[in-house]
Image: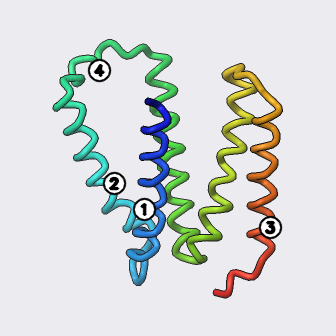
């Protein structure tokens, strides 16, 4: 079931990139993210309330709060940086470079979460880096 959710996330992320790039014409990238953030906040808290999970806030450990709030800071920074890059460059190039975060996440997961490293993971990450370098070195035509 995780694969279905992951694919839905990938499709949604792709739509975010394309729609954001289209919406950034004559709009400051930080303002665009602020506008979208209002919807993100409204929708996600609505889902939490609908699912009946609001009361479980009190059960979250101090360590989990630290990790989740830190992730929130980096989510915000990542999105601000991504929107700024999208406002300046072609979406296909920006997203390719930005998604090298997958390789960085793999490395960090192996180091900090002690996830198992396999030859398939190494080959896949290498192909992702090679693809990003190939695209970065090509002429974006913009």
- Mark 1 lies on a secondary structure that is helix
Looking at the rendered image, the disc whose residue lies closer to the viewer, 3 or 4, is 3
Q: Position of residue 77 (x, y in %)?
A: 53, 51
> Which numbered disc covers residue 134?
3
> Which numbered disc covers residue 26?
none
Q: Which residue is mark 2?
A: 37
Above or below residue 24? Residue 96 is above
Q: Answer whether labels 1 and 3 touch (C-beta < 8 Å).
A: no
Q: Position of residue 101 (x, y in %)?
A: 66, 48
Of pointers 1 and 3, the one earlier in the residue sequence: 1
Front one among 120 and 69: 120
Q: Which residue is mark 1?
A: 15
Looking at the rendered image, the quarter that the N terminus falls into is top left
Q: Residue at x 62, y 67 (%)?
A: 94
Q: Residue at x 58, y 69 (%)?
A: 85
* Label 2 to label 1: alpha-carbon separation: 16 Å
> Which numbered disc covers residue 57?
4
């Amino acid at each position: 079931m995780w694969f279905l959710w992951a694919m839905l996330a990938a499709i949604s992320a792709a739509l975010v990139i394309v729609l954001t790039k289209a919406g950034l014409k004559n709009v400051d990238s930080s303002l665009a993210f602020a506008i979208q953030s209002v919807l993100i906040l409204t929708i996600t808290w609505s889902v939490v309330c609908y699912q009946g999970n609001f009361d479980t806030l009190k059960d979250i450990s101090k360590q989990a709060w630290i990790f989740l709030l830190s992730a929130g800071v980096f989510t915000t920074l990542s999105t601000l940086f991504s929107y700024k890059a999208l406002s300046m460059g072609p979406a296909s190039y920006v997203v390719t470079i930005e998604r090298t975060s997958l390789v960085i996440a793999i490395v960090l997961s192996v180091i900090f979460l002690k996830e198992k490293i396999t030859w398939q993971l190494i080959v896949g990450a290498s192909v992702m880096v090679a693809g990003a370098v190939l695209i970065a070195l090509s002429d974006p035509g913009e």
